[in-house]
Image (cartoon, rainbow, N blue to C red):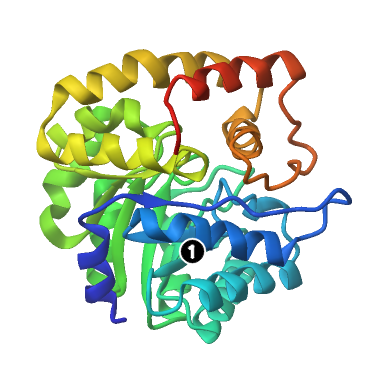
Amino acid sequence: MSPQELKAVLQAGLLSFPLTDFDAELKFAPRSYAERLEWLQPYGASALFAAGGTGEFFSLEPQEYREVIRVALDTCRDRTPILAGAGGGTTLAIKYAQEAEALGAQGILLLPHYLTEASQEGLVAHVEAVCKSVSFGVVVYNRGACRLTPQSLQVLADRCPNLIGFKDGLGDIEKFVAIRQTLGERFAYLGGLPTAEVFAGAYKAMGCPVYSSAVFNFIPRTAMEFYEAHAAGDTATTDRLIRDFFLPYIAIRNQGEGYAVSIVKAGATLVGHGAGPVRPPLSDLKPAEVDQLGALIARLGPQ
């Protein structure tokens, strides 16, 4: 898949990032992971981000990373495009990107470099180096320590033809509008805030109709129902689901630090597709919180 073909895929349809399965000893569980991907296949996500943020990329060692991407590609080959997460310092991010390309992934989501702040010149040099190390499509994730300006993105767009996507995880309306107006149709634009469904309407109004869904991991029917209503302008349905599910869900998620991942793993367990525990320093939901989530999911009906 060429970068431009990947860009076209990313401009329509629901995107998601599967959980990474761990066993009781916190080791990668490839069979369970493959079964998860098979379960999600019929629901029709347009692309999946393997070893992304919800897939706990930040906790994977290089050999595990390779196995996660390999299993995702073997399971979804010729059915769903797979973008691999890549991140860390420039040298490490390049190694991840090149590994993903060698395995046959269709592109990468370039996650923040983590921890330290960086100048715009440094961020441009980092993203450019990763883009030029591979030939497939790259989507940059503006979040955390990676806060690219419209001017920096324009420089990167001019220098890196395979930089085809921009995912926003900041929620800064002024900055996003400036980026969208500066870059126009040069990028595919993706909403990337936690529990993106709540922000989907606002992003659509700003020229970003596509987002990645975490809840697709455990309520895929509802996730698709929401996306299809969102795409069709059916605000009665989206408002109902936001009121009855997403706002109470966020209230549970906000009870603990790092729960954006933990609550998704808890949801997967509750619907019979458990992915094991999260790895430290993340922590799992407390029993009372799991009970709250279970009651909320039960109101949605079968998935």
Q: Residue furthest front?
A: 302
In percent of width and height, residue 81 lies at 38, 70
Query: As displayed, is residue 26 above or below residue 80?
Result: above
- Secondary structure of the residue carrying numbered label 1: helix
Q: What residue is rendered at 45% in x and 78% in y?
A: 77
Left or right: 52 in relation to 282:
left
Task: Report the residue marked by disc 1.
Answer: 126
Q: Quadrant of residue 226?
A: top left
Query: As displayed, is residue 92 above or below residue 292?
Result: below
Q: Residue furthest right?
A: 25
Q: What residue is rendered at 43% in x and 28% in y?
A: 301
Q: What residue is rendered at 81% in x and 53% in y?
A: 23
In percent of width and height, residue 59 lies at 72, 52
Amino acid at pointer 1: His
Q: Quadrant of the C terminus?
A: top left
Q: What residue is rendered at 44% in x and 64% in y?
A: 127
